[in-house]
Amino acid sequence: MRNALGSVDTVLLLGGRSEIGLAIVARLVRDGASRVMLAARGGTVPDEELERLRRLGAEVHVVDFDASRPETHQDVIDTAAAKLGDLDVVIPAFGVLGSQAAYDRDPEVAARDVAVNFGGHVSAGLAAARRLREQGHGTLVVLSSVAGVRVRRANFVYGSAKAGLDGFAQGLGDALHGSGARVLIVRPGFVIGRMTEGMTPAPMAVGVDEVADAVIEALRSRARVVWVPARLRPAFTVMRLLPQAIWRRMPR
């Protein structure tokens, strides 16, 4: 549970091997979070990540989590609450960054990845929101993307899933208004990390640490939406107004 100052004590990371997710969790532990649950497929997280959090002073638990099996998501939330108590911060940080070329070749793969990138977040997000609403406090951190703000031809399957996720997060935040629980929407641009290894960074690319720092600052300020980097917000205000004939020629 939170202390009298309202600081974060418990954290649930859905996608327990996520580079961005783990970076956020590490910062929350440094700020005082004492109990963490990492939910990962197969219930396995690299030992070095577990030890890093434990060295920082956290009590760390691991549980099996499969983003592609929505029927199990409520049980994962319930398990976390039973082990940790009230959930102060829940971070769904799972997803698949497939290539548009692969999706064009195999629509079944595209559908499967969209089911994870959007459908998995819907079921996990609703399950977490139910718990946070019952508690009367807590923050759901939704890792959206500028890829979903205006979908580009170069990655339109991935972008469409992110567009759906962003819309879902906005609606869920409105639904939670007045309950004490809230949603923080994070819209990073191109993130340099394991997930994008081998890809040429897009303009205004950021690192994992920059995203994690921005999330922590947004949690402290109780922001509703954070763009990473912040200058992407005015940039996409303009990009939304570009004629479609110009937009479709954008490389990515």
Image (tube, rainbow, N blue to C red):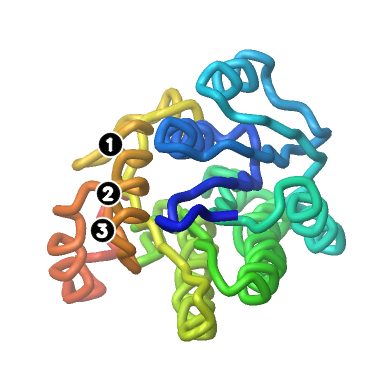
How many other residues sit within 10 Å of disc 1, few (<14), some (14-19) or many (≥20)? some
In this view, the mark in front (3 or 2): 2
Mark closest to the chain's N terminus, 3 or 1? 1
Residue 71 is situated, as x and y percent measured from the top left of the image, at 86, 63
Tell me the residue at 42%/28% (across/down). Answer: 193
Q: In the image, which disc is placed on residue 249?
A: 3
Residue 5 is situated, as x and y percent measured from the top left of the image, at 40, 56
Tell me the SS state at disc 3.
loop
Question: Total of numbered circles in the picture?
Answer: 3
Q: Is residue 156 left or right of residue 16?
A: left
Q: Is residue 235 left or right of residue 124?
A: left
Tell me the residue at 62%/69% (across/down). Answer: 132
How many other residues sit within 10 Å of disc 3, few (<14), some (14-19) or many (≥20)? few
Mark closest to the chain's N terminus, 2 or 1? 1
**Residue to which mark 1 is pinned:** 206
Tell me the SS state at disc 2.
strand
Q: Nearer the viewer, residue 48 or 101?
A: 48
**Residue to which mark 2 is pinned:** 228
- Does residue 47 sit above or below 228 in this rendering? above
Give the alpha-carbon distance from disc 3 to disc 1, as whole Å. Answer: 24 Å
Q: In the rendered structure, which amino acid carries the disc numbered 3?
A: Arg
Q: Quadrant of residue 161?
A: bottom right
Q: Is residue 42 left or right of residue 128?
A: right
